[in-house]
Image: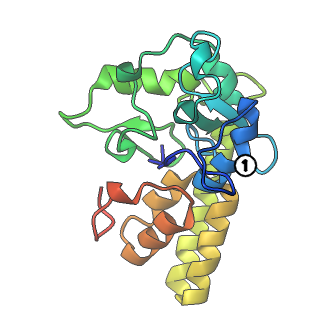
Amino acid sequence: MRPVLRGDVPVDDVGNPKTYGDYKDARDDLIERMGDYCSYCEVALHSAIDVEHVLPKSLNPLLEREWTNFLLACGNCNSIKGNKPVSLPDFYWADQDNTLRVFFYEQDQPPQIVDDAAVVVDIAQRTLELTGIDRVPGHPDLSDRDRRWKKRFEAWTIALMAQNNLVIADSNEMREVIVALAQGYGFWSVWFTVFADDLDMKRRLILGFPGTCTDCFDDNGEF
């Protein structure tokens, strides 16, 4: 789960904080800040993308048009999360926590929980279950319409192929192409994991995805 920075509420042409007559009107501003990626599963969303309410609007109507309550979500993550009651401290959030310290990624596996005393396993597990990003074939709740796992596995394949190509022919142009591939496929955490030993690529990936929280990393790309 990529740590993201939503930032302060955008301003209009005369410098006043924007207000949204409909929460859906915030979509383009959110995309500009964080890219068109699901804030939960990280899939690239080139067409259908939802403005997602961290605290469900049905249970918190005063927050329906509140910028600080918005993230972006794919249809699967948004529908699975639905109107479940949410207490913020009971979950890890991409816009509030350094989620790289909570979850790690392995090929052909759902996101895994980091074995660290600082990580509360129950909170991490609830976070995975909140939007079902742990659902892969064999999971009892995986539906036929849920292809997030498949798209994540495809990103692994392409990222590993790109890594191999870089070994064969390393160049600035090849590195730029790899970032463009990553931007197109999404799943930033997969690409960041594959290139974990390449500081230059890590820096490019951090800067190449809008809204990645740069404060979560040191000068060596460590988190």
Q: Secondary structure at mark 1?
A: helix
Q: Residue at x 64, y 62 (%)?
A: 183
Q: Is residue 105 left or right of residue 80?
A: left
- Residue at 54%, 90% in the rendered image: 171
Residue 190 coordinates in the image, percent (x, y): 51, 54
The residue identified by callout 1 is 28
Check the picture and name the quadrant holding the C terminus: bottom left
> Against 113, is 125 above or below?
above
Q: How many residues crowd mark 1 within 10 Å: few (<14), some (14–19), many (20+)?
A: few
- Type of amino acid under label 1: Asp
Q: Is residue 151 left or right of residue 109?
A: right
Using the image as rendered, state which of residue 139 and residue 197 is in the foreground. Answer: 197
The percent coordinates of residue 80 (x first, y second) are 64, 20
Residue 71's spot in the image, x, y percent?
Answer: 58, 37
Residue lying furthest right: 47
Can residue 134 be seen by looking at this rendering? yes
Q: Nearer the viewer, residue 8 or 35?
A: 8
Q: Position of residue 82 (x, y in %)?
A: 64, 17
The reply, left or right, for residue 156 in relation to residue 21 is left
Q: Residue at x 54, y 75 (%)?
A: 164
Indicate whether 183 appears above or below 150. Answer: below
Give the image quarter of residue 172.
bottom right
Farthest residue to the front: give it.
Answer: 14
Q: Residue at x 58, y 39 (%)?
A: 41
